[in-house]
Image: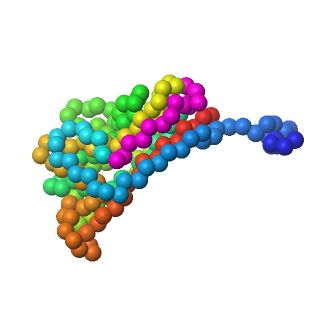
Amino acid sequence: SAGQFMKTDGSGNLSFDAAGGGKVLKTKTITKTDTYTNSSTGTHDVTGLSLTMDAPASADSKYLVIAMLTGTSPNGHSNRFMLDGTTTGTLLQGDAAGNRARGISGELFQNNTNQAMTQTLVVLDDPDTTATQTYKVQVVNRSGSTTHVNRSVSDGDGTNILRSASTLTVMEIQD
């Protein structure tokens, strides 16, 4: 019948079954084309990189969160990007180990004032709730450091100076 597929049991026996499986229920995306700079120590939300998803279809829904970010951190500081969710909090970070920094992404290390690094962060969040969820990109600054988003450290007016864009996409999915 329509919508069915042929499957095998691995021993050569074939049968028909109803199609099923996971599907994307909702998708939202935002693009940030302006710049953001922060020099305060600590964790900070990046203005313009936050998405609120409507209440999910069920508590079994998961959210695929994808962020593509361009940023710089001058003077060799180990600033980094993070993802945060309403229910889950910080999404995917390394284990605590002494004084080491924890995060989802590598360090934003700047060794040329005209370059910026692009990082892609991908996390499957399972908040196990029917509450509305907000996802946001954050930067974590070490003491005395600065993070720039969508621009290089040197922001002079020249053809070798970068201005870029960053995106945040969230998809509600069900198995």
- Is 49 above or below relative to 55? below
At 47% from the left and 48% from the top, the residue drawn is 29
Is 97 magenta? The answer is no
> Could you say where residue 78 lies in the image, as x and y percent from the top left?
22, 47
Answer whether residue 8 is visible to the viewer in this image. Answer: no
Tell me where residue 164 appears, x and y as whole percent.
Answer: 34, 61
Q: Is residue 85 left or right of residue 98?
A: right
Give the quadrant of the C terminus.
top right
Quarter of the picture containing the N terminus is top right
Q: Residue furthest bottom?
A: 159
Instruction: Single out the residue that lies furthest toward the left.
Output: 144
Tell me which residue sits at (13%, 42%) in the image. 143
Q: Nearer the viewer, residue 92 or 95?
A: 92
What segment is highlighted magenta in the picture? 48-61
Q: Is residue 13 left or right of residue 132?
A: right
From where the camera sits, is residue 170 visible? yes
**Which residue is at the front of the view, 123 or 23?**
23
Question: How far across and how far down the image is residue 63, in percent?
Answer: 50, 37
Residue displayed at 20% across by 38% down: 42
Name the quadrant containing residue 24.
top right
Q: Nearer the viewer, residue 9 or 133?
A: 133
Colour mapping: rainbow
Q: Is residue 58 magenta?
A: yes
User: What residue lies at 52% left-to-right and 25% top-to-bottom?
Assistant: 130
